Amino acid sequence: MRISKSKASALYHRDFTLYLLARFLGAVAVQMQSVAVGWQVYALTGDALDLGLIGLAQFAPFVPLVLIAGQMADRFDRRRIIMLCYAVEMLCALFLIGFTLTGPHAVWPVFAVMALYGSARAFMMPASQAIVINLVPAGSFSNAVALSSSSFQLAVITGPALGGLLYLAGPMTVYTTVSVLLALSAMLILLMRNLPRPTNEREPISRHTILEGLRFVRSRTTVFGAISLDLFAVLFGGATALLPAYASDVLHVGPTGLGLLRTAPGVGAALTALILAFTPISRHVGRWMFGGVAVFGAAIIVLGLSTSFFLSLAALFLLGAGDMVSVYIRHMLVQLETPDAIRGRVSAVNSVFIGASNELGEFESGLTAAWFGLTPAIIFGGAVTLAVTVAWMYSFPELRTMDQFPKRPPETPSSGKRTRNTGHKARTRRKKPPKT
């Protein structure tokens, strides 16, 4: 297959383009839903802790399911797994429509729906992370990662703003739009061609095979350092979960203002991802990684100190830009270091770290806001993020001094079998009598 020299070479591959469009529509839908759920719950209870419980409800089923989901991603068609997950997420949107129609007086049904959504997300993340490298040649992978990240961040920009605007017509309008977009995502994934069957599809499911990804990550210092840095930095820097309360109580803006606040990190991240698509990071990888996380933490502190809507937008913009650098480097490291036969399980481990940092981070932010107050909780989270960055710089010197990415994905274990067979044939040839 000839690889285009275009800066957007990954878009020349049909399946990747379909996947990219499906992921964009699905991400827009989820971002719209997040704005509607957060505003609806806070309007019902007025309790910042409930905003944290939304994240906890999504994370609760995530932990016991995601490692099994990684094994599934290595055994079955990743395309079909993603399609089914979009269908379940669409079902969640339909449940939220039913919740709204009943004239809600309690919020526990929302938590139940978010738990179902978290279950679908547990199976979605390993499959979607592992599939990208199967859709493009090795030479286009860096471009594919940047385009995938930029499209996701574009969804983060448009989704919250669109969700905030549509919420003016009521949550029913938002949830109906979400269900339509998720149905379209599932249909686009269905149009993709069948991928090659996994080489280890007959490998029995066992505790040993399920934990293979965890063992692999622990054995790679740079990979473990990158994903654990993201875990603890974002765990304490989950200030975006508090934006409904921050918009209402500090900035005194409505749903439209909240949508703009939720959009600002996506704008920063999307612009950064576009820059990375055309001028990818090729040197000083470790320095870029820690620099991005440091900017992320500092932006959270500025957000906590701000009482100006425009200063808050600027802080959230920088937050998204710093986070995008970290996400890009981490994703490249994980996928380029991992053989395809265990890529789903390694992606599952990465998903556990991402899920813990996002959903548990939201719960941590809600809990500290209930204890200390809204503004102190945000400032505390940013300060801890900076402290984690410094601690990880000294704990993982290999990551701090890392200069370049691995050149290409390693061979799968199946290549080892070919080597052994070749060796066997070579021994057979040596047994032949020499020519006379």
Image (cartoon, helix red, strand yellow):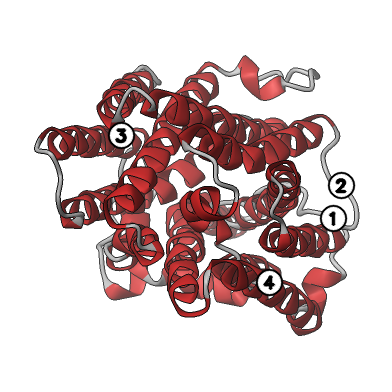
Contact check, label 1 and label 4, Cβ < 8 Å: no
Amino acid marked by disc 3: Tyr
Query: In whole angstroms, how far apart are the C-alphas of marks 2 and 3?
Result: 35 Å
Amino acid marked by disc 4: Thr
Residue to which mark 2 is pinned = 282
Amino acid marked by disc 2: Ser
Which tag, 1 or 4, sits closer to the chain's start? 4
Q: Quadrant of residue 107?
A: bottom left
Query: In whole angstroms, how far apart are the C-alphas of marks 2 and 4?
Result: 26 Å
Query: In whole angstroms, how far apart are the C-alphas of marks 2 and 1?
Result: 6 Å
| Camera-nearest residue between 259 and 269 | 259
Residue to which mark 1 is pinned = 404
Contact check, label 4 and label 3, Cβ < 8 Å: no
Residue 85 lies left or right of residue 13; in this view the side is left
Contact check, label 2 and label 1, Cβ < 8 Å: yes
Query: In whole angstroms, how far apart are the C-alphas of marks 4 and 3?
Result: 33 Å
Residue to which mark 4 is pinned = 385
Which tag, 4 or 3, sits closer to the chain's start? 3
Where does the N terminus fall, quadrant-wise?
top right
Label 4 vs label 3, nearer the camera: 4
Q: Residue at x 36, y 33 (%)?
A: 79
Percent position of residue 150, x then y: 65, 33
| Camera-nearest residue between 154 and 102 | 102
Q: Residue at x 72, y 21 (%)?
A: 8
Question: Residue 86 — which label?
Answer: 3
Q: Residues within 10 Å of mark 4 (few under 14, many from 20)?
A: many
Q: Please say whether residue 134 is visible from this viewpoint.
A: no
- Badge 2 element: loop
